[in-house]
């Protein structure tokens, strides 16, 4: 059985609705699973992530589930299709996304 992505049931306010600051983000970051933390940290640093890359570098099998969980908690993440890759996608936080996610 897979561990729950967000283990603290009292964390109910999505971050971008909370409009907190870096301290707020750091406080809530500890509630994420290890895999979600890896994805979130890469996205917040301006990197893009793809399922293939996450599997080969970090052994994260389903990046889509990590992205879904982060979005469910209110993080804004932009999705891009990889041309000629039969539906493959990658995700990143645009400058607008980063502003929304860090304020």
Image (cartoon, helix red, strand yellow):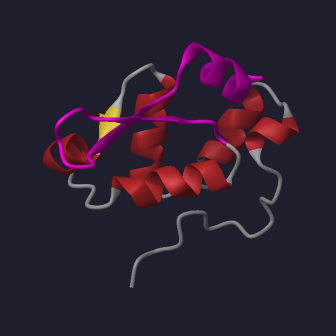
Left or right side of 11 for 4: left
Query: Which quadrant is home to the C terminus?
Result: top right
* Residue 16 makes an appearance in the image: yes
Left or right side of 58 for 69: right
Instruction: Please give the range of residues in magenta.
Output: 75-103
Q: Residue at point 62% right, 25% down?
A: 97
Q: Residue at point 36% right, 28% down?
A: 48
Query: Which quadrant is home to the N terminus?
Result: bottom left
Rendering coords of residue 2 (x, y %): 40, 77
Q: How many marks?
A: 0
Q: Nearer the viewer, residue 10 or 40?
A: 40
Up the image or down, 8 lies above or below 69; here it is below
Up the image or down, 8 lies above or below 75; here it is below
Rendering coords of residue 49 (x, y %): 33, 35
Rendering coords of residue 29 (x, y %): 61, 44
> For the view shown, which residue lies furthest in the left direction?
56
> For the view shown, which residue lies furthest in the top direction?
95
Q: Nearer the viewer, residue 64 or 89?
A: 89
Rendering coords of residue 3 (x, y %): 46, 74
Q: Residue at point 48% right, 58% down?
A: 33
Up the image or down, 53 lies above or below 55; here it is above
* Residue 34 makes an appearance in the image: no
Is residue 28 inside the magenta stretch?
no
Q: Residue at point 77% right, 48% down?
A: 14
Left or right side of 39 for 95: right
Specify the quadrant of the image occupied by residue 80.
top left
């Amino acid at each position: 059985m897979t561990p729950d992505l967000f283990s603290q049931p009292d964390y109910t306010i999505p971050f971008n609705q909370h409009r907190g600051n870096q301290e707020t983000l750091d406080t809530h970051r500890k509630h994420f699973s290890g895999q979600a933390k890896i994805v979130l940290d890469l996205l917040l640093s301006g990197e893009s992530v793809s399922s293939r890359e996450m599997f080969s570098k970090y052994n994260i099998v389903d990046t889509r589930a990590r992205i879904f969980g982060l979005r469910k908690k209110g993080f804004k993440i932009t999705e891009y299709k990889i041309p000629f890759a039969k539906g493959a996608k990658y995700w990143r936080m645009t400058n607008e996304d980063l502003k929304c996610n860090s304020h």
